[in-house]
Image (cartoon, grey):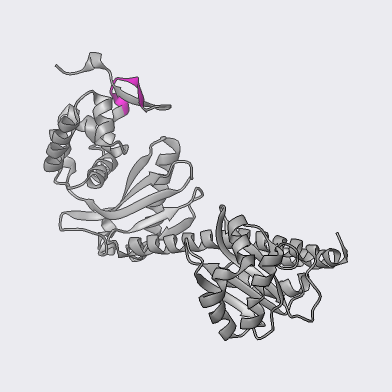
């Protein structure tokens, strides 16, 4: 490389460090504008970002040219600019001094006219993401300045390629930020308290309802109980009950006169170590109804506690989904609950008072291979056929 490139390289490292440390589009634009003149000396500079699937600018950052030039270039010039035409067609950096034919150079002279003689030569480099043109970085010199060198073109190409990477990253982060904000806003409008905790029990997120749900120590205790169950019992879903003695603290939880205390229903998010927990008022006075459940109803209730869907329960017990639904309907009526979460809480409360139905582990079981998901097989425990009631 020539002298220009060696000078450019002395400023390239701090430019790249600043660029890839940029946390927003504004910082990317500012960094490129700040360092570009050190790397490729110019009299005019422009950053253009286009609207999706068009060449209509959505973001323009320019210096060294007037607003009149920018307007004229978009209305009259871009469509007949031979440099931009090559950039858009080839997604490569183009210099008016080195890459244009004689005919194209004559056509390029229109820029001098609309810039009042300010622009005589230019280099344009594409901003491209996933092979699609997203914009361009343009530098220009006046008629009295020396021509751009091949090293200048190469240097601007490096700037644009790294700027494209930074632009893609900030767009992803911005999109993720919007999604997270939407997710948090959605959870905040829910009346049901919701909490996310990490593998070590550290709080990741709590929606507005959870922040006023009750005593913090009781909540921590409930979360610890379900976390231990998920860790040691290998359940995917776990439910714990906080003593009804503190039920007056949970006025913000969905409740009615037949409910007391707080139920914590936790789900382990596979592959993340994160636990999602819902908090709600626990059912009260259901223990005496548990003995009225049939053996099949108790069995299905335990499957619900473990988080199985109706389809999974049907597969595990060799009955139809509709039969599962009918059994659950009878269970809900007997226990006076209205959801699977309330059923799990009722079973958990009964377990805490020593009136729970026979645990699933006490039933004779045999392994059942669930290969409905193709290559993803899992083993589900189901009651042995030999011990089935007639």
As for residue 366 lying within the magenta part, the answer is yes
Q: Residue furthest front?
A: 103
Q: Where is residue 83 drawn, in percent x and y?
A: 64, 66
* Magenta residue span: 361-372
Tag count: 0
Residue 150: quarter of image: bottom right
Q: Please give the name of the residue rendered at 77% of the width and 65% of the height, measured from the top-left corner.
A: 12
Q: Is residue 171 left or right of residue 266?
A: right
Q: Residue at x 79, y 81 (%)?
A: 144
Q: Is residue 69 left or right of residue 198?
A: right
Q: Would you say residue 31 is visible in this rendering?
A: no
Q: Residue 310, image x and y in percent?
A: 24, 35
Relative to 324, residue 62 above or below: below
Instruction: Work out which quarter of the rendered image holds the C terminus and state it.
Output: top left
Q: State the image quarter where residue 216 is shown.
A: bottom left
The foreground one among 190 and 262 is: 190
Q: Which residue is located at x 22 percent, y 55 percent?
A: 260
Please identify the dominant SS of the magenta region: strand
């Amino acid at each position: 490389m020539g002298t220009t490139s060696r000078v450019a390289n002395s400023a390239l490292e701090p430019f790249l460090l600043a660029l890839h440390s940029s946390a927003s589009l504004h910082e990317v634009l500012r960094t490129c504008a700040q360092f570009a003149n050190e790397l490729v000396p110019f009299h005019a500079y422009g950053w253009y970002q286009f609207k999706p699937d068009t060449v209509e600018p959505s973001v323009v950052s320019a210096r060294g040219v007037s607003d009149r030039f920018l307007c004229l270039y978009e209305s009259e010039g871009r469509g007949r600019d031979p440099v931009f035409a090559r950039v858009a067609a080839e997604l490569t950096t183009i210099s008016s001094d080195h890459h244009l034919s004689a005919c194209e150079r004559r056509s390029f002279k229109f820029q001098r006219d609309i810039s009042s003689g300010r622009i005589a030569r230019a280099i344009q480099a594409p901003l491209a993401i996933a092979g699609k043109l997203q914009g361009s970085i343009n530098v220009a010199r006046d008629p009295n300045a020396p021509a751009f060198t091949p090293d200048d073109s190469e240097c601007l190409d490096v700037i644009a390629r790294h700027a494209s990477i930074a632009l893609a990253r900030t767009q992803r982060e911005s999109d993720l930020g919007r999604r997270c904000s939407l997710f948090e806003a959605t959870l905040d409008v829910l009346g049901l308290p919701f909490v996310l905790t990490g593998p070590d029990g550290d709080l990741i997120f709590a929606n507005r309802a959870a922040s006023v749900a009750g005593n913090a120590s009781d909540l921590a205790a409930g979360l610890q109980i379900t976390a231990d169950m998920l860790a040691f019992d290998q359940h995917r879903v776990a439910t714990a009950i906080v003593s009804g003695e503190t039920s007056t603290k949970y006025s913000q939880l969905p409740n009615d006169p037949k409910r007391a205390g707080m139920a914590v229903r936790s789900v382990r998010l596979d592959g993340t170590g994160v636990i999602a927990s819902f908090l709600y008022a626990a059912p009260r006075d259901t223990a005496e109804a548990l003995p009225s459940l049939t053996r099949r109803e108790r069995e299905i209730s335990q499957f619900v506690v473990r988080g199985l869907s109706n389809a999974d329960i049907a597969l595990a017990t060799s009955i139809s989904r509709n039969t599962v639904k009918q059994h659950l309907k009878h269970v809900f009526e007997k226990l006076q609950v209205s959801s699977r979460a309330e059923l799990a809480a009722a079973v958990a409360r009964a377990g805490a008072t020593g009136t729970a139905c026979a645990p699933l582990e006490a039933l004779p079981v045999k392994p059942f291979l669930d290969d409905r998901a193709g290559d993803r097989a899992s083993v589900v425990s189901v009651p042995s056929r030999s011990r089935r009631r007639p």
